[in-house]
Amino acid sequence: MLKSRKSQLAGLAIAITATLGASAQAAQGITGAGSTWVYPLVAKWAAVYAKNTGIQVNYQAIGSGGGIAQIEAGTVAFGASDKPLLPSDLAKHGLVQFPTAIAGEDLVYNVPGIGPGQLIVTGPLIADIFMGKVKNWDDPRIARLNPGVKLPNLDITVVHRSDGSGTTFTFANYLSKVSPQWKARIGADTSVDWPTGIGGKGNAGVASYVQRIRGSVGYVEYAYILENHMDYARMLNASGKILSPSLAGFQAAAANVDFTKAQDFYVILTDQPGAASWPISGCTWQILRKNAPKASNAAVIRFFMWGFEKGQAQARSISFGPLPVSTVQAIKVYLKKNLGI
Amino acid sequence: MANSEAPEPARGRRVIVLQADFLFHKLAVLMATVVGITLLAAVAAIGYDSWPAIKTFGVLGFLTSSQWDPVSRHFGAYPFIVGTLVSSTIAMLLAVPVSFGVAVFISELAPGWMRQPVSAAVEMLAAVPSIVYGLWGLLVFAPAFANVEPWINDHLGVIPGIGRLFQGPPMGIGMLTAGIVLAIMILPYISSIMRDVFIATPVQLKESAYAMGATTWEVARNVLLPYTRTAVAGGIFLGLGRALGETMAVTFVIGNSDNLSASLLMPGATIPSVIANEFTEATSKLYISSLIYLGLVLIAITLIVQVLAVLLLGSLRRRPGGAA
């Protein structure tokens, strides 16, 4: 009895040593933490990268807030945030940041008789709907934009995200740009003080509420529109063109930004000019420490450069738009200047 | 000879028993202390982390403000306190009578062969993970309930006074849905305790009442409940504690809105649901601190409920028949 217990203990000790050994080995790879939104992309890239190079990338989707805290504390090699840090904040903590991939979101609705792409909306109209000022689908402000569409007399139920998310930040940031009243009353952050509506958890939660509640309208990532075959709106962009959401539209929004002029890539891709630019486009930023060991920063940069160049197909397969070549070039220059890598 | 030999091993054994007893005593004290220290340390850490929010909003200001605005960094707990208390109250109003019925059925009415399966079925409800209740509530219950809500609007919504509680668009999710899902979740806790103590009630007491011509209801009301009331109250508070702290299932079906509404059909939010929703992407220090402060408020609410429970149990014990 005693002997068997001893051997059990010995077995346990071996197991613990093995686990510790394994984690020590993982620590030699690249560790990152942050945004849940970019997680599918980093995970996909990491799997292929590990197969090709043998280097493990261990990314924990703990949320943007957590990612920023972890990189400030120096416990990870890179942090990911859906909201760029202000250049002043970067300077204060000795950090650098660069964009990773582009995605977009759109309005989805559940209105009997109106199919995908049949409804046209503008930014100010979305703001009025989400502020509870446009309450019914037969409102003249909707009708004016959609002549020929039969709008029912049906109450609008607004569906927003209940959890803090980059999706909400991008959406609210866009509305702040196009509606002065939204900017004054609500503003933009990963979660905002919604004046009306119900909150669903995650893109999936919003999608499921919209699919179920008649008369509802919400906003979700493009990938969820494709996956769930949802009724999406066409939008009027900053250049006065009416567009359907597409990867090309998200990339166009980034292509029109002159990143060489924007300090620390502090540009939010919403409401960008350009005939093809999708208005509600967003981005995730990777954050690195200037004073981290050079080898660690270099490993992180090698991984993302590999992703920018070789991981485009994987990105597209999950509805992330690869960065335009010009942006990747700007990132290279920026990193050379700030990190010497 | 037998006398001189016998005490020897007995004394040796006694020493071992005494030592074991001593060790066990110390070990038990240690365990109890560790639990106490852990609790205190947790409260202290939560208090420390919520200090920036306490300093900014104060206690009363935080408890009474109904604005929760991450953009302007103004945080108030009032809508979430109300949401927590209202959803738990709905759950208790529904779960306690049903649990009582289930327990009386199992202990008094069910034929012998049915008791075990019914008990097991009720206890199985406790084994279902709360995330499953959340998904079930969102995908199955809420759509079905959305079809019932127009009826609620038309029949309960027109009653003067309380009618206001039952008016609103038929979305299927909201405070009432959260309360109902919570009720199903806490039902097994309350009913299994009730069932156990009802079964443990001395047969003589029950039989004498039946012999006097009492109905099953009269036996339950006048014999079972008075005899077991402290245990029954304990079970109810166990269920209430669980309802107050439930996170995942509520988050899925409550609608997550910090706009307070008189109607139970409208969305709301609870303290655990808002913490679970917003913690991961909370980016400013004050935001995180306010979320932790919410946790401190929840601990305080739970503590107040516990104290009330202890006081209530004390007063029940002092009454005749409260010895059990």
Image (cartoon, coloured by chain):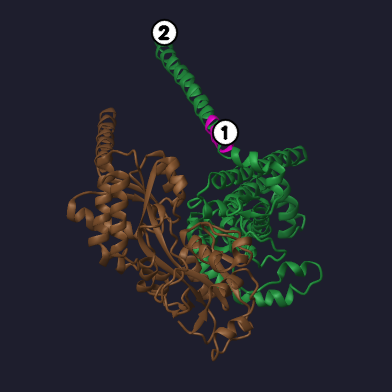
- Residue at (57, 33) in percent of width and height: B44
- Residue at (47, 46) in percent of width and height: A88
What is the span of residues highlighted in magenta in the rendered image? B37-48
Main secondary structure type of the part rendered in magenta = helix
Please tell me whether residue B290 is drawn above or below residue A220 in the rendered image.
above
Whether residue B104 appears in this view of the structure is no
Residue under label 1:
B44
B77 or A84: nearer the viewer = A84
Residue under label 2:
B4
Where disc 1 sits, the SS reads: helix
Q: Which chain is green?
A: B
A180 or A148: nearer the viewer = A180
Farthest residue, direction right: B160
> In the image, residue A63 lies at what x, y percent?
44, 52
> Which image quadrant for residue A19?
top left
Subunit bearing disc 1: B
Which quadrant of the figure contains the C terminus of chain B? top right
> In the image, residue A89 lies at what x, y percent?
46, 45
Q: CA distance from mark 2 to mark 1?
A: 61 Å
Categorize mark 1 by other alpha carbons within 10 Å: few (<14), some (14-19), many (20+): few
Asked whether, in this view, residue A26 is left or right of residue A91, the answer is left
Look at chain A in the picture and name its colour: brown
- State which mark lies toward you, 2 or 1: 1
